[in-house]
Amino acid sequence: MVFQHPIREAGIQIPKGTVKPQEDAYQAVIREMKEETGLEKLHVQKLIAEDFWENADGAIHNRFFYQICVYNVPDEWDHQPTGGGDEEGLTFHFFWITSQHEVQLIEGHGDYLNLIFN
């Protein structure tokens, strides 16, 4: 599942978010998926990768990539994220891809798609 960000320069992305101080990564992925995608029926299958990644501004981020199953989901849908912050008022267009080369994701977002599409 990927989404087209309404700000053209932000491109096509995978759902993502941050871990709040009182959360672990597992709790955060469930919360972020619900906020960002609007999906409620989901199951976290497994952690597929963890790494440290340097942003263009030099900030280092500890990233966690999870494989998630979702149920009763349309082929495409629009959702306005509910987490606030920079995403408030935006509408994301979600859709499914069937291979790691189907779309060009923004830098860093496709790093582990080979572990899903193998």
Image: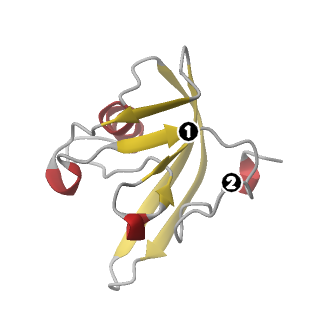
Q: What type is the residue that disc 2 sits on?
A: Leu
Seen as rendered, the residue at the extreme right is: 118
Q: Secondary structure at mark 2?
A: helix
Residue at position x 39%, y 83% from top? 56
Q: Is residue 4 left or right of residue 74?
A: left
Seen as rendered, the residue at the extreme top is: 72
Q: What type is the residue that disc 1 sits on?
A: Phe
Residue at position x 40%, y 65% from top? 8
Residue 84 point in image, percent of width and height = 16, 45
Q: Is residue 89 left or right of residue 75?
A: left
Query: Relative to 45, is 24 above or below?
Result: below
Query: Relative to 115, is 33 above or below?
Result: above
Residue at mark 1 to residue at mark 2: CA–CA distance: 15 Å
Residue at position x 22%, y 36% from top? 82
The dot on residue 113 is 2
Residue 24 point in image, percent of width and height = 34, 42
Give whichever of 27, 11 is nearer the camera: 11
Give whichever of 87, 45 is nearer the camera: 87
Q: Residues within 10 Å of mark 2 (few under 14, many from 20)?
A: some
Which quarter of the rendering shows the N terminus? Answer: top right
Q: Residues within 10 Å of mark 1 (few under 14, many from 20)?
A: some
The dot on residue 75 is none
Q: Secondary structure at mark 1?
A: strand
Residue picked out by circle 1: 95
Give whichever of 76, 38 is nearer the camera: 76
Residue 115 point in image, percent of width and height = 73, 50
> Mark 1 near mark 2, Cβ–Cβ under 8 Å?
no
Q: What's the image's color scheme?
A: secondary structure
Query: Relative to 103, is 73 above or below?
Result: above
Q: Is residue 8 left or right of residue 98?
A: left
